[in-house]
Image (cartoon, rainbow, N blue to C red):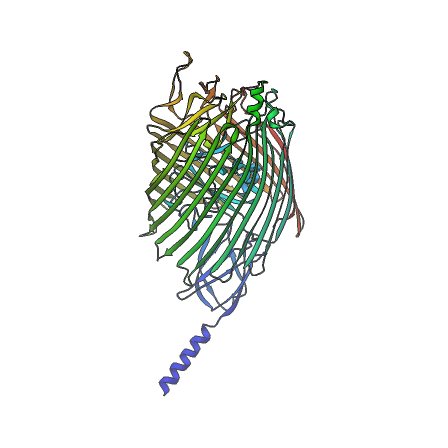
Amino acid sequence: MRIRTFLFFLNFNAILLAQNEPVKGVIRAGDEPVSFASLKFKNSSKTYTTYSDEVGAFALAMPLGEYQLDVEALGYRPKEASITISKSNKNTLVIELVEDLLGLDEVVVSATRNRVNKKEAPIIVNTLGEKLINATQAIAVSESLNYSPGVRIENNCQNCGFTQVRLNGLDGGYSQILVNSRAIFSALNSVYGLEQIPTQIVDKVEIVRSGGSALYGSNAIAGTVNIITKDPVLNTWEVGSYLGLVDGDTPDRILNFNASLVSDNLNSGATFYGIHRNREEWDANGDGFTEMVELKNTTFGTKLYHKPTDRSRITLDATVLNEYRRGGDRLELPPHLTDITEELTHNTILGGASYDFHNPANTNFYSVYSSVQFTDRDSYYGGLGGGRTEQDSLTALNAYGMTKDLAIASGFQMTNNFKRDILTSGIEYNFSNTQDKIVGYNRNIDQSVNAVGLYAQYEWKPNKRFSALIGSRIDHINVEGTYSVGDISRNVDISQTTINPRLTLAYQLTDDLKFRGGYARGFRAPQAFNEDLHISSVGGEPQFVILSNNLEAEFSNAFTGSLNWTKEFNTTQTNFLLEGFYTSLEDPFTLVSTAAQLPNGSIVEEVRNGEGAKVYGANFEFGVSPSKKWLFQIGGTLQQSEYNEPQLLYEADGSVPTEGDILINEFTRNPNVYGYLNSNWTPSDKFSLSATGTFTGSMIVPRVVSDSGFLSLVESDSFFDLNLNAETHFDVSEEFQLTLNVGVKNAFNSFQDDFESGPTRDSDYIYGPALPRTFFIGIKIGKMH
């Protein structure tokens, strides 16, 4: 009986000792509070989680004792420490964080489809965040992507402003564009979509170079660009305005707003945003034809989340946009009364829903998601072409078209965390349907793509220094399409199953130096991609692209190896990356300009399988931040893009004795050297000065010189595009702040100076920086923090 009584009191005392106590504290970085940081207190039996509020304070109930503390906050280095909570300190905990000025410790999702610290990720991930976007005063996503190694944005048309992103020297069709990790960018949206997404809604952009088909499916041969939109974090509102003067006199006007609401317990939140842009056309050489198109864009959207429990989250997002763009001559007239006009009106809806949840032990994570994009487009590609005959007028009148484009991405993902290792697996279904018609040219694209993918990857971590990522994806793709223009018709009906493996090894050579190396296989099924949906004008007539007969799938093998050195000297952060890459292409899709012409004089280009190609080179990046006041980054790429055998670029039909076949050994529109710089001086919280810029080396650019489409190859100049931005900030009160920006883009006016002129010009003969010298001023007011 005495023993039982003793055990009872022993257990009773243990229960009393394990009783929850109120624990309070604050998180700060120097004298500044850190808002909405995540805190996890772990002991041998349980994990206690909480968040800091707007003033950095936190409170929770937990037993006193010893814990392992993990703290994460956006823009700060993560902190791990052992901590003892006792009666004497339970109400006065102070946790100090240090700013992550170079973003070396931020969390990324694009490397493994899971949240992982960037330094610990087995694959190199570059991020472009709010600081860089503010420094460059980038209006659309396309304007910010140049500031990452191996990435280049190029403008491909004077008449419509078609842009595409190149990763490691491969054109836009080789890159997978994601929005919140979902592949809802269709072939049509890839033509103009990067210029349609305003940076105002972007939290950051994550870029993974080299093959990603093992995780994200086809088209990720060159890599992935993952546009991650902002989550509601604070109760804020903001109204802003921007005025740019292109070449000193052509206005580009923007008005935008955004607002966020978050519940006190952080279980629900919503953000709302809108932007209206009105940019007038610009003519570089005074010939009456645009080099920069007229652009009007209105976008509205929202993103909401709700946490039904501590272990689950529902997220909804929706965006609607209307965009009008027009280039050519005499924009005040109806398109069919001009010499050349490209006019497009896009009405696009994007939306998505996801449900994420995990088990009580935080070891298994699940996600169910679905996203959709629908675009309704009216278009005009044509004009009188300099002629004034009855037939010219009839042809011009028949150049109106319309496009319907639908893309759906749905899937389920499961992540299992073992002691060290992580298993990620999932299933994904992608559907797209594109119908593009111009009745007057008998131009028709009716394409449906159905793809089902199963993927799995295992991240093996036998110790703290070494990790191996082994994965593969099985895709079954069905492409059904009819493609016609004039009297030419093609059909595609392909069902194909492919296996795309991926292997990545990472080894921490020293505390500061990490090696990463990998291999990935990728593929692209025959179908119309972004460039194939674009229509340019040559010799006053449209130039169409059509798929060749018996077009076969394209495959790639990508190899990468990198050394990443990161070192912290007291408050100084440094980072150096050297990355080598080699990608071989089997049966690559190549665009051949044919001498064949339609009855109305239009030129035909054909997509064919080439004999093989390889792209190889090195990316580098160096960054240093001695303190919060100073930041400097520079990066670049040295590369070669070559065909295994001379590749046909223009195929003559013998009708013109002076025009023969043109063959090339290297990719066109592809400089062997390009790079960027980003520097910032912030002497105080109220003022900062930024200098950013890009360098584009010389490249070979095709130029159409006859009505048959015959080409000359021009070696372009190199360009250095320098931007300067001064920003000042005023805290009028805790509830109201004001920010002013003033500066200049392309300060040296490093810009193309040999544009063609007149109605018979080659509209695709455009290269180099997107803007001439442009002065700007911006203002934002609201509760911004």
Position of 439 with respect to 560 (left or right) is: right
In the picture as drawn, the residue positioned furthest to the top comes out as: 657
In the picture as drawn, the residue positioned furthest to the right comes out as: 732
Q: Is residue 714 above or below residue 564?
A: above
Q: How many numbered marks appear?
A: 0
Instruction: Write down the quadrant of residue 359 in the picture.
Output: bottom left
Whether residue 525 is visible here, answered yes or no, is no
Given residues 593 and 522, the one toward you in this image is 593
Q: Quadrant of the N terminus?
A: bottom left
In the picture as drawn, the residue positioned furthest to the bottom comes out as: 1
Instruction: Write down the quadrant of residue 446 in the picture.
Output: top left
Percent position of residue 214, x then y? 36, 44
Q: Residue at x 50, y 40 (%)?
A: 405
Given residues 207 and 539, the one toward you in this image is 539
Percent position of residue 616, x then y? 36, 31
Given residues 551 and 18, the one toward you in this image is 551
Whether residue 644 is visible here, answered yes or no, is yes
Given residues 215 and 534, the one toward you in this image is 534
Percent position of residue 779, x then y? 65, 40
Percent position of residue 679, x then y? 53, 36
Q: Is residue 206 above or below residue 660?
A: below
